[in-house]
Image (tube, rainbow, N blue to C red):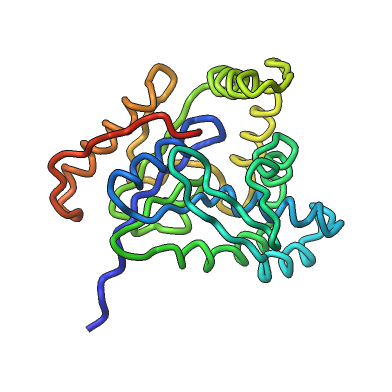
Amino acid sequence: MIPKAAPVITVDGASGTGKGTVSQLVATQLGWKLLDSGALYRVLALAAQKHSVALDHEKALDVLAEYLDVQFIAQLNDFPLVILEGEEVTGTIRTEIIGNAASIVAALPAVRAALLSRQRAFREYPGLVADGRDMGTVVFPDAELKIFLFASPEERALRRYNQLKERGVSVNLGDLIKELQERDKRDQERIVAPLKPANDAICIDTNRLSVEDVVERIVREIQGKKAFPAISELNLEFGMAE
């Protein structure tokens, strides 16, 4: 008898919708595995930069993705540590430059195919919370629960602006809005796995919701799903990085 695959919750959405923070909180409270799929594309973009591979050189990027030497180490209340070829690059992959580069390489069919099996390998017991842009539509179409978060470019840019200001980074709000709009257009119009909610996804507008509100909404959905083990109460702890 073939064992049933571990349950999966997918959390998709554009940059700045809060999916990273929400996914980490839900995974932590459930005691499940976490997949930050966006980090894989960011790491690949950084590796391309490191090895002088052009972002439109699909064949070279395909090879680089297949042999990507990357390690994720979970941290409490922060991003997971990311190790690329023995070097800690957690902060580097979170820059706007690498984020935009990741959006470009993620649009390449060969790159997405190369990383698909690696992403699916994260599906382990007791369960997985997968954060990305096509987790519910392509990577885990059979997920027990699919969430899609959205918010306006202006709201998402403001969140990013406040984050960067808190870190002492000088940034222009107007530039952030423009960059997000360009990234959204690229993600939504790409031929392979465009950014869109799965047909059976639960869409949540996060414009006026706190992280706590979104997590509580997802917890209610989990509790109402017969596919999941009974979950009576979760002692939610907030404050993790977005």
* Label total for image: 0
Q: Tell me: residue 238, above or below residue 155.
A: below
Q: Tell me: residue 180, above or below residue 5.
A: above
- Whether residue 170 sits left or right of residue 38 in the image: it is right
Q: Residue 130, how many percent across, how many down?
A: 43, 51
Q: Residue 7, how many percent across, how many down?
A: 29, 59
Quadrant (top left, top right, bottom left, bottom right) of the N terminus: bottom left
Q: Residue at x 16, y 54 (%)?
A: 229
- Whether residue 168 sits left or right of residue 147 in the image: it is right
Q: Tell me: residue 90, above or below residue 216.
A: below
Q: Residue furthest right?
A: 52
Q: Residue at x 23, y 36 (%)?
A: 235
Q: Residue furthest bottom?
A: 1
Q: For residue 21, what is the image quadrant?
A: top left
Q: For residue 6, what is the image quadrant?
A: bottom left
Q: Residue at x 39, y 57 (%)?
A: 141
Q: Residue 203, how many percent across, how many down?
A: 37, 34
Q: Residue 137, how many percent across, how many down?
A: 45, 52
Q: Residue at x 44, y 34 (%)?
A: 240
Task: In this rendered view, identify the residue nearer to me: 191 or 74.
Answer: 74
